[in-house]
């Protein structure tokens, strides 16, 4: 028993430790967008399904000795792949820079390709281990239930997720994490090989045909299998949708990937451990209550307190997953059919992942999957309440539960309709792709002199442009003349002569309003929809068209593009390099590391200026930038500009340069605020290490 328990625990631990680790490693290659995590999850859900299908095939088609032989061969192949990767890369699971993507239009295939090459076969075998060990345990101990091993595997998964952001991520660089995980996988392979050999030794003859099923043990019907899939798919949709909701406007960090996944696994542990953890009546009322609270949070918008948002979404996920998984447990079959049961659950999880990662971004114009998933959860729950009752179910309580859930369906249906209207009908433009949701709205429609068009990415404004001719070239939002970047343009040492400017992040191109004839302006932008709108599609924004400068827009991740230019012997010699990538609350960490700064300085003139826009609702990037400036012996100025009633938003800028005389001139020095944070308390960020917990406001 101890062998099976430890083998299942270890494989589950490694299975879920690799997910945030490899996702964080490849995140910078795809612009740091939250969709990287949901796509990574889809890949792992698909492999999990493959692993369960393999276990189902192995158990149903091969005798015990053949099972062991096939499994040993696959384990051996995976170790050979590990050896080859260890010789080629910095660790067996961290690919080198040659794997970075070249295009930006459909990154899903690139993510799948990288994951398949790095962790595909090891993950498949880890996914196989739990159902396979449970099957072998059921043969060795036919009188004991293997479902407790399933709960134990979820404990291992939960421990992996909890320890990653708390212990592993803050303590170890990514390369070191890769080596430690690889060592764990080798240990797993040894245990799995022993299990296969043990099965081979105990299998004296080919597996006999299964005995006839008793009246009390009928095979699962197609309807039962469909319900397993539907409940698992619903839980998967809610997991990914709530994770996206947290990360798109807070931060793309492992903690906010791990927290929902931890809750998801916790509900598996509780529901599969014992029936006492799940009460239909309790969760009926809990579902209605949290649905009402979710409606209030949705109406409050992103200005709501960070902790409150995370708390509400976490409770929402817990209640919904307890319902989905609790109902699954009520429908679980005899252990004879456990591999089929797990296979259907994994298929449902993969279907949910496909719906959120592949279908929703190209079918929906907003993040509608969360209200749709909640509505689906309520409908499935109501169906189970009505059609899956036991002999002890009281008619009165059944009617109460059904009525409460019917009320929740009406509430959530109304929320969905209002949300769809607000995100797709009210805006002038609503579009969504892998990188997020864009809206174009009209401002001040009743005042012709102040009428303007505004671009928003989710809940983050990218600025607005006035329509009337005499105001059309005015800089707005975070970029007005009194802002840090406005002061930099107006007081640049090379003015009134021409300057060469690089800008990471396009928005609607407001900074083009500062240019003059002879200037060169080079934007880097990963979102193709943003590029089309800024270049004039729809006729809403004209900053780029109106600029007298030479303007170029380079599609793709900014850092990768800059690296490729440098590798091609084409340093850009910028007089000013602007990082306008952090005002969305979900920040691309890879653009503010030591390696990134090294890259920027190679593209800057010796006296050039690096300007970072660090306005952010939840994160204070000042200590990170001060640390980087100190590491490269650069001067740094922090400038804060309040909002006004006209065209300025509250903006926070940091100016970093070797040119101390620029920072000392009165226009800059008079607006520079003193250092009020001690950067020495913060570890320098690198590509291998970053810690967003330290800079939460």
Image (spheres, rainbow, N blue to C red):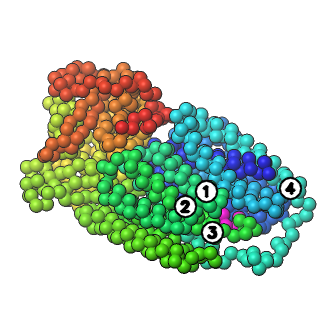
Circle 2/circle 3 CB separation < 8 Å = no
Asked if the magenta segment contains residue 340, the reply would be: yes
Residue assigned mark 3: 330
Q: Specify whether residue 503 is in view.
A: no
Q: Is residue 291 above or below residue 530?
A: below
Locate the C terminus by quadrant.
top left
Residue assigned mark 1: 270
Residue assigned mark 2: 322
Disc 2/disc 1 C-alpha distance (Å): 8 Å
Where are the magenta residues, as a range? 339-343
Circle 4/circle 2 CB separation < 8 Å = no
Residue assigned mark 4: 200
Q: Which mark is residue 648?
A: none
Q: Would you call the spot at circle 3 few (<14 residues within 10 Å), some (14-19), or many (20 or more)?
A: some
Sequence-wise first label, 2 or 1: 1
Q: Would you call the spot at circle 2 few (<14 residues within 10 Å), some (14-19), or many (20 or more)?
A: many
Circle 3/circle 1 CB separation < 8 Å = no
Q: Quadrant of residue 654?
A: top left
**Of 418 and 548, the residue lying toward us:** 418
Sequence-wise first label, 4 or 2: 4
Q: Would you call the spot at circle 4 few (<14 residues within 10 Å), some (14-19), or many (20 or more)?
A: some
Sequence-wise first label, 1 or 4: 4
Q: Secondary structure at mark 1?
A: helix
Sequence-wise first label, 2 or 3: 2
Sequence-wise first label, 4 or 3: 4
Left or right position of 258 against 570: right
Q: Position of residue 528 (x, y in %)?
A: 35, 54
**Which residue is at 25% across, 62% downward?**
427
């Amino acid at each position: 028993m101890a062998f099976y328990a430890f083998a299942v625990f270890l494989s589950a631990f490694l299975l879920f430790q690799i997910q945030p680790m490899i996702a964080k490693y490849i995140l910078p290659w795809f612009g740091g967008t939250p969709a990287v995590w949901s796509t990574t999850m889809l890949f792992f859900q698909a492999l999990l399904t493959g692993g369960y299908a393999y276990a189902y095939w192995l158990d149903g088609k091969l005798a015990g000795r053949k099972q062991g032989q096939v499994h040993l061969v696959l384990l051996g192949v995976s170790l050979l792949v590990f050896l080859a990767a260890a010789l080629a890369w910095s660790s067996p699971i961290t690919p080198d820079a040659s794997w970075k993507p070249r295009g930006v239009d459909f990154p899903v295939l690139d993510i799948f390709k990288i994951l398949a090459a790095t962790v595909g076969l090891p993950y498949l075998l880890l996914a196989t281990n739990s159902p396979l060990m449970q099957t072998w345990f059921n043969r060795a101990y036919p009188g004991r239930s293997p479902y407790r091993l399933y709960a134990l595997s979820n404990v291992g998964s939960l421990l992996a997720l909890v320890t990653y952001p708390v212990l592993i991520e803050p303590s170890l660089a990514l390369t070191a994490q890769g080596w430690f995980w690889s060592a764990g996988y080798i240990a797993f392979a040894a245990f799995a090989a022993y299990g296969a050999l043990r099965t081979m030794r105990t299998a004296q003859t080919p597996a006999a045909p299964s005995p006839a099923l008793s009246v009390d043990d009928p095979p699962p019907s197609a309807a039962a299998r469909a319900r397993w899939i539907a409940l698992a798919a619903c839980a998967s949709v809610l997991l990914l949708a709530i994770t996206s909701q947290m990360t798109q406007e807070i931060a793309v960090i492992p903690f906010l990937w791990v927290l929902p996944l931890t809750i998801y696994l916790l509900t598996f542990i509780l529901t599969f451990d014992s029936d006492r953890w799940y009460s239909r009546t309790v969760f009926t009322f809990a579902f209605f209550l949290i649905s009402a609270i979710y409606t209030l949070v949705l109406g409050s918008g992103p200005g709501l307190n960070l902790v409150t948002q995370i708390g509400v979404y976490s409770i929402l996920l817990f209640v919904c997953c307890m319902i989905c998984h609790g109902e699954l447990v009520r429908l679980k079959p005899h252990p004879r059919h456990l591999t089929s049961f797990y296979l259907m659950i994994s298929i449902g999880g993969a279907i949910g992942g496909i719906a959120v990662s592949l279908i929703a971004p190209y079918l929906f114009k907003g993040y509608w999957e969360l209200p749709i998933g909640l509505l689906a959860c309520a409908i499935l729950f109501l169906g189970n309440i009505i059609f899956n009752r036991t002999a002890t179910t009281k008619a009165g309580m059944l009617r109460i539960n059904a009525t409460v859930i019917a009320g929740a369906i009406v509430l959530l249906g109304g929320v969905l309709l209002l949300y769809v209207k607000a995100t797709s009908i009210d805006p002038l433009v609503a579009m969504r792709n892998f990188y997020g949701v864009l809206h174009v709205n009209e401002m001040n429609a009743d005042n012709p002199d102040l009428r303007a068009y505004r671009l928003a990415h989710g809940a983050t404004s990218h600025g607005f442009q006035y329509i009337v001719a005499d105001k059309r070239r005015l800089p707005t939002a975070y970029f007005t003349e009194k802002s840090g970047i406005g002061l930099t343009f107006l007081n640049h040492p090379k003015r009134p002569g021409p300057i060469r400017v690089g800008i990471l992040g396009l928005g609607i191109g407001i900074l083009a309003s500062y240019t003059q004839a002879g200037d060169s302006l080079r934007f880097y932008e990963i979102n193709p929809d943003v590029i089309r709108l800024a270049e004039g599609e729809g006729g809403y924004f004209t900053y780029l068209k109106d600029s007298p400068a030479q303007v170029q827009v380079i599609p793709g991740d900014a850092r990768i593009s800059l690296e490729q230019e440098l590798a091609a012997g084409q340093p850009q010699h910028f007089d000013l390099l602007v990082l306008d990538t952090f005002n969305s609350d979900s920040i691309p960490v890879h653009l503010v590391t030591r390696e990134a700064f090294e890259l920027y300085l190679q593209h800057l003139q010796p006296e050039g200026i690096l300007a970072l826009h660090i306005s952010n609702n939840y994160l204070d990037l000042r200590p990170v930038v001060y640390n980087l400036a100190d590491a490269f012996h650069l001067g740094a100025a922090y400038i804060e500009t309040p909002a006004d009633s006209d065209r300025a938003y509250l903006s926070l800028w940091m100016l970093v340069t070797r040119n101390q005389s620029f920072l000392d001139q009165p226009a800059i020095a008079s607006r520079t605020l003193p250092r009020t944070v001690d950067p020495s308390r913060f570890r320098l960020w690198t590509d291998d290490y970053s810690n967003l917990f330290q800079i939460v406001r």
